[in-house]
Amino acid sequence: MTSLRLEHIVKDYDGPGGRQPALRDISLEVGDGEALAIVGPSGCGKSTLLKVVAGLEFPTHGRIYYGDLDMTEIKPQDRGVGMVFQDYALYPAMKSKGNLAYYFEHHAYTHEQMEERVRRTAELMGVDFQHLLGRFPETLSGGEQQRVAIARCIVRDPTIFLMDEPIVNLDAKRREQTRIEIKKLLRTFRVTTLYVTHDQQEAIFMGDRLAVMRAGRIEQVGSFDDLYYAPVNLFVATFIGSPPLTVLPAALSEGRLHIAGQSWPLPEELAGHLPSGPLRLGVRAEHWLRDQPDGLPLEISHSERIPTERIALVHGHWLGQRVIVSLPLEEADDSRGLQRLRPDWEQLLYFAADDEHLLYSPGPPALF
Ligand SMILES: Nc1ncnc2c1ncn2[C@@H]1O[C@H](COP(=O)(O)OP(=O)(O)OP(=O)(O)O)[C@@H](O)[C@H]1O
C-alpha cells in the first residue's frame, strides 16, 4: 500500500487542430488507504487522469509518485495498479477462477500460492462469491462479472486501485448492491483508490474525499461538506448538490442587496464580508424563508414530491428568475407562505460576478 502524489501533471493529446490539453497542471495527494472520488462533466479529463496514474498514458509534463517512488517513467505492468473499468474486460475463455489465477500463472508463484491467494480473496469477497468461480463470464450477470473483475484486481494485492465508472452499466438495483460491496472491499483492504464517477451520490458514498474537475483542472478537493458549504467557486457550487443551486444576479450598495429592481437591507455583519458592486447569489432549495413581511410572491410552475426525503420541491419564478424551493412534505399543499418569499440572506453563498470565486459562505451548519 502506498500514498499517491501528482505534481503539476499536464497531458496534451494530438488533435486535428493541433495539441489539445486534456490535463492542465494537476497536483494532488491521496493518502495511504484513502479513497478519492473524482467527479466532473464529460470530457473534463477524469479517465485521462486515471490512465496517467496507471501508466497507460505518459504525462507531457509533471511527475507521479507512489509513496516516495517516482513512477513517471515506469511501465504500467510494473506499477502494480489494479484497474476496473465500466466494461468488465474478463478473459471470456476462462472461468472466473482462471481469471483470478491468470496473473499468478504468468508470474513466479507456485500452484499452492496461487490457490491460497484465490481462496483468501474469494473468502473476502463474501459468502456467495465462491459459486461464481466455476462459471464462465458469459454466464454471469453484469454485477457478477464486475465482482469477478474487482476480485481479479484484489487478488494481486494492488498498490493503487483505479476504478473508472465501474458500476455505470448495471441496472439500478445491481448498482446499489455492487456499490455497497465495493465500499466494503475498500474498507477491508484500505487500498489507496481513485474512483471516477459522474454520479454525485456514488462519489459521496465511495470517496473519503471528493475532487471536482473542470476542463483538465481540479477545481477543489475536500469532504462533501467542504464542497457543499464552502465551494471555491460557482462551478463547484452548481456541480455539487441536488436539486441544483439557483443563481441570482445581484448587486450590493450601501448595505442593501439589489435583485431585479428590488432591494433589501443585508444584516450588517454579513454586508461587512462583501464588497460593493455586482455579485452572484447561490441559493440552495432549502435556503428560502416563507411568510416574510418583506417577501415577494413565487409564481409556481410545478411541484415535485420526494416522500423518501419528506420534502417537496416547488419549481417556479421569483422576480422573473427560475428558482427551486424545498418545503417540508406536510406543508407542500399550503402555498400561502410562498406569496411572501425571500432568500435567507445569512445562509446564501456569495460569488464574485466576474470570475465567480466565493466571496462568502456561512460554512457548514453547527449541529448543536
Ligand atoms: N486518445 C486520445 N486522443 C485525443 N484526445 C483524447 C484522447 N483521449 C481523450 N481525449 C480528449 O481528452 C479530453 C479528456 O477526455 P477524458 O476521456 O479523460 O474525459 P472524461 O472526463 O473521462 O470524460 P467522460 O466522463 O465523458 O468519460 C477530451 O476532450 C477527450 O476528447
Image (cartoon, rainbow, N blue to C red):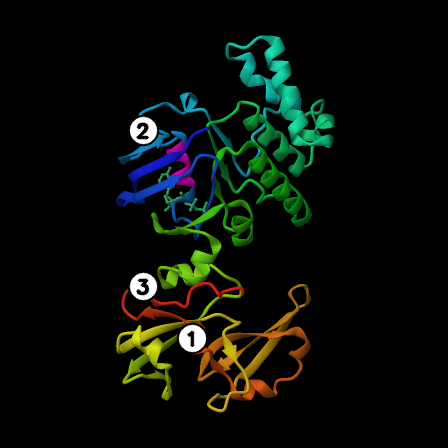
- Label 2 or label 1, whichever lies nearer to me, is 1
Q: Give the spatial CA distance, label 3 vs label 2.
A: 33 Å
The residue closer to the viewer here, 45 or 4, is: 4
- Circle 2: residue type: Thr
Q: Position of residue 118 (x, y in %)?
A: 63, 20
By secondary structure, the bulk of the magenta-drawn segment is best described as: helix
Q: Is mark 2 within 8 Å of ligand 1?
A: no
Q: Is residue 79 above or below residue 198?
A: above
* Mark 3–mark 2 CB contact (< 8 Å): no
Q: Give the spatial CA distance, label 3 vs label 1.
A: 18 Å
**SS at badge 3:** loop
Question: According to the image, label 1 marks what residue?
Answer: 346
Residue 161 as seen in the image, left or right of residue 217: right
Q: Residue at x 65, y 84 (%)?
A: 334
Q: Residue at x 65, y 49 (%)?
A: 172
Residue 55 position by quadrant: top left
Q: Give the spatial CA distance, label 2 vs label 1.
A: 47 Å
Q: Which mark is residue 72?
A: 2
| Magenta segment boundaries in residue numbering | 47-53
Q: Residue at x 58, y 42 (%)?
A: 167
Q: Is residue 24 above or below residue 338?
A: above
Q: Which mark is residue 357?
A: 3
Q: Residue at x 72, y 22 (%)?
A: 134
Q: Is residue 228 one of those drawn in magenta?
A: no
Q: Badge 1 local density, few (<14 within 10 Å), some, or many (20+)?
A: some
- Circle 3: residue type: His
